[in-house]
Image (tube, rainbow, N blue to C red):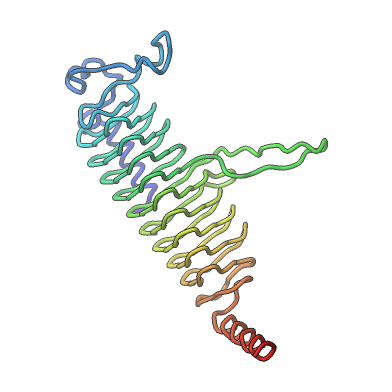
Amino acid sequence: MTMAVTVRRVLAFASSSSAPFFNLNQNANLRYILPSPRHLSAFSEDGSVADKFHKWHNGGGTLHESASIDSTALVEVGAVVHSESIVGPNVRIGSGTIVGPSVTIAHSTNIGYNVALSNCCIGDSCVIHNGVCIGQDGFGFYVDGDGNMIKKPQMLNVIIGNNVEIGANTCIDRGSWRDTVIGDNSKIDNLVQIGHNVVIGKNCLLCGQVGIAGSATIGDYVTMGGRVAIRDHVSIISKVRLAAASCVTKDIKEPGDYGGFPAISIHQWRRQVASRCQALVRRDP
């Protein structure tokens, strides 16, 4: 199932009167959803904002009255779900997590502690580990005529496919000219940086400390070893494997194994390494 279909289904559930989503704007339902609502006075001194947030019955978390959340979703104490967000069936949201405005989380997704989600849609059965940040602004600036550093607008979103796993403290930036996309069944290790406008295909594997600069395009079934670096605007075809600490500086147009800085065919890279080792031995016996 594509991500677009998933989002449409979630939106359809939320808008259907027969679906198990609760919209907290419907005051008649508040006594059933929130048997003992407690408002958050910390949001504002006069209570105008605090009155819009309520305690969720399953887990004790806090959500905005305009959020739509399935009755089976667990929102733990200390987690906050903001306005217009949609949380699907059997979702688990850990303590300290912030679900920003208009975020969509599809069914059976498990979100860890202290996660920050904004400007994103997350698919079915995903695992988002502790400390992940998704949907913040990308790193985009330019120098104007007066020599000042000016921020480029970062106005688009992040789309996470189905069955994606994202490791602890990984950051995925929102798009500026196209959405940042992570394809179905891709697995991302801890401490990975994915820049704005990056598109990653299906069934990709990214090991720890991989860094992908903005607007790169990655095909399906691509594997990146630890600390691989991808230059901005580079395209990598499907079924490529990159050795640890490789750096891709230009497009890779043929499937296969690559390594080195700049990344070249793995066989060429191994010959270069062997030749270098032999030269060192001859020079310094």
Residue 87, x across and y down, in percent: 31, 36
**Residue 8 sits in which quadrant?**
top left
Q: How many marks?
A: 0
Q: Is residue 107 left or right of residue 283?
A: left
> What residue is at 39 percent from the left and 47 percent from the top?
4
Q: Which residue appears farthest toward the right when viewing the image? A: 146
**Residue 258 sits in which quadrant?**
bottom right
Q: Is residue 176 left or right of residue 190?
A: right
> What residue is at 49 percent from the left and 58 percent from the top?
209
Q: Quadrant of the C terminus?
A: bottom right
Q: Is residue 140 left or right of residue 7?
A: right
Q: Nearer the viewer, residue 172 or 106?
A: 172
Residue 210, x across and y down, in percent: 51, 59
Q: Which residue appears farthest toward the front when viewing the image? A: 285
Residue 265, x across and y down, in percent: 57, 79
> What residue is at 58 percent from the left and 39 percent from the top?
154
Residue 131, x across and y down, in percent: 41, 44
> What residue is at 26 percent from the left and 41 percent from the top?
91
Q: Which residue appears farthest toward the top when viewing the image? A: 46
Q: Quadrant of the N terminus?
A: bottom left
Vertical relation: 221 (above or below) 73: below
